[in-house]
Image: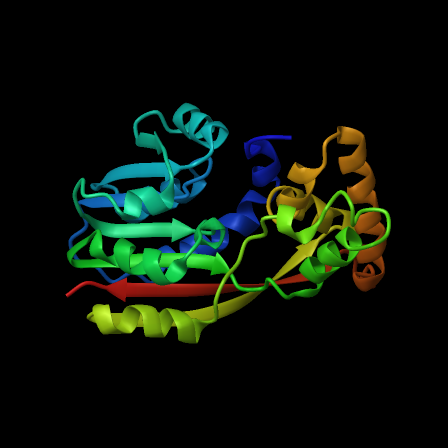
Amino acid sequence: MSGWNPNQYLKFAEERTQPCRDLAARIAVTSVRRVIDLGCGPGNSTAVLRDRWPDAEFTGLDSSTEMIERARREYPEQRWMTGDISAWAAGNDGQFDVVFSNAAMQWVDDHAAVYPRLLARVAAGGALAIQIPGNIDALPHGLMREVAAGPEWRRSLPPEKVREWHHHEMEFYYDTLAPRAARLDLWATEYLHILPDAEAIVEWYRGTGLRPFLEVLETDADRRRFTADYLATLGPHYPPRAAGGVLFPFRRIFLVAYKG
């Protein structure tokens, strides 16, 4: 298993795009000429930004060739680049009025170093705007680790081989960015998604949080068995509601740091 699957990711396009809309709506920058979308995926987040600032110039960057190829097909008029966010943050090829990232920075190491570098890439009067999942210790993630640590999987999935995503809490991001920002807005939102059943939650995570576990396994048969074991463990915690469907809470952390 290699590469990100845009089709899998976009199975929940509306739910994944709503936090992007919420973040874009909070950015209070009066003159926006250049925007970069870091971790742009298949281009759905960049489309939100284009709707917000239709006259700006846009660049989308993602580490996944598959995601960038999908974005180029869907939005050929934009500029798309395959690249690493940390490497871009350390570069010196110009500044942007809005440096934006929706649900990507959780895969980037060393937030203490990278976030200030991203703010340095913001033009005067502009903003750094980031949204990341804020639920690494939520029940579904704990159950992933529980299944991986069980007797059937612990040899195939030792913790040192599974590169999970990560986040800090808002105090960390305040301490990291407040001394460098003219103004800093921080907030968290728990979205309550209504999905058909527990299997849909597994499908959600197959596009994101389950990937670090599935990528370590060597065969499709093993991936199917691990996914089945995860569903069997997850299902009892998400019973169907009397009105239909299951409730799937998902917490996200937001920040907008303004450059003086």
Q: Residue at x 38, y 69 (%)?
A: 173
Quadrant of the rendering where the C terminus is positioned: bottom left
Q: Residue at x 71, y 64 (%)?
A: 139
**In the rendering, at what x and y percent does residue 224 appear?**
79, 36
Compared to residue 236, the image places residue 51 above or below, namely above
Q: Is residue 34 left or right of residue 139?
A: left
Compared to residue 22, the image places residue 95 above or below, namely above
Q: Quadrant of residue 112?
A: bottom left
Q: Residue at x 83, y 61 (%)?
A: 239
Residue 181 visible to an observer of this rendering: no
Quadrant of the rendering where the N terminus is positioned: top right
Between residues 3 and 69, which one lies in front from this camera angle? 3
**In the rendering, at what x and y percent does residue 129 appear?**
33, 58
**In the rendering, at what x and y percent does residue 55 appear?**
20, 41
Compared to residue 188, the image places residue 75 above or below, namely above
Q: Is residue 160 left or right of residue 168?
A: right
Q: Is residue 118 left or right of residue 33?
A: right
